[in-house]
Image (cartoon, grey):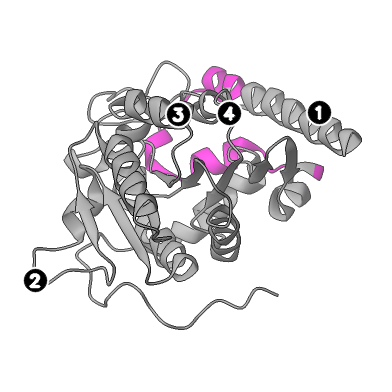
Amino acid sequence: MTEIPKEEMILKCPSTCAGCGSLLALRYILKAAGKDTILVIPACCNSVIQGVYPYMLHTVPVYNIAFAASAACASGMSEALRATGQKTNVIVYAGDGGTADIGIQALSGALERGEDFLYICYDNEAYGNTGMQRSGATPLGAITTTTPNGKTVNKKDLDRIIEAHNLPYQATASSSYPADIYNKVKKALTIPGPKFIHILAPCPPGWRIPSSKTVEIGKMAVKSGVWVLWEKENDKFTISAPSRAAMKKPMPVIDYLKAQGRFRKVDEKTAAVIQANIDKNLRKIAIEAAQSEENI
């Protein structure tokens, strides 16, 4: 069993919305990373909830940067630290809007160059900080302020885009499985070069769920196959234990959709498309894992 440090790297009484999945994930990221860490945070929910100096939420240094520039900033920061012999962890913590949309150009460039830092995208599937406008990561059928009748196109497959850069380490995680986050961050920080972790972070006000249901909804995403937990170290692709169990008999996605107010306008036809997309993705992931196992 994973032993997670009791020391908190985030101070009490944050200004987050109740039940914030992003803050829950960050707690365990920083427990894994430790004090010798610098966070790079672009415009996002976390750039607001961190507070105003000198009353800051985090106990490690934070560098706030423009929406599009977090990966560029982390690249220069990492190069400077390594040039002076320092092994300080450089971690970008950015939302899906600042990763899949506005920040993807700088991110792609940094990954292609092989810069030595860990990029973590917390995905609440919309621009949460500015009132839940749709992002490229918003799923099909979800209501946002800019898709009042539900989004009509699929969620951008960010993980496949990142995978095309052939990183030494890439993983997915969920704020509902903190030990999994802790272990993956710990592993990522031992590997030189660019690393990427994509974390599903349910947002109670944006997803229109009770704040007490954050963890439950995150687990439903995994159990239904909407979100698959996996990691890829070089060419070794492994499905994480919660998803291996879920894939034996996935929960019908309609149960996941009905639990959230943002999907209240999804009709039977759209629900069927969503289920078909999930089934297709699960087959693809199962094949990739089997092929990786054969090549070991």
Give the amino acid type for the residue marked by disc 2 in the picture. Pro
Q: Residues within 10 Å of mark 3 (few under 14, many from 20)?
A: few
Q: Amino acid at mark 1?
A: Ile
First to last magenta residue range:
248-273
**Pointers 2 and 3 in contact (CB under 8 A)?**
no
**With respect to residue 12, does 264 lie above or below?**
above
Q: Secondary structure at mark 4?
A: helix
Q: What residue is disc 3 on?
A: 113
Q: Quadrant of residue 143?
A: top left
Mark 1 vs mark 3, foreground winner is: 3
Name the residue that disc number 2 marks. 54
Quadrant into which the N terminus falls:
bottom right
User: Which residue appears farthest toward the front when viewing the image?
Assistant: 84
- Spatial separation of the CA atoms under disc 2 and disc 3: 35 Å
Magenta region, mostly helix, strand or loop?
A: helix
Point out the tag, 2 or 3, that comes first from the N-terminus: 2
Which of the two labelled residues, at mark 4 and mark 2, occupies the earlier sequence position? 2
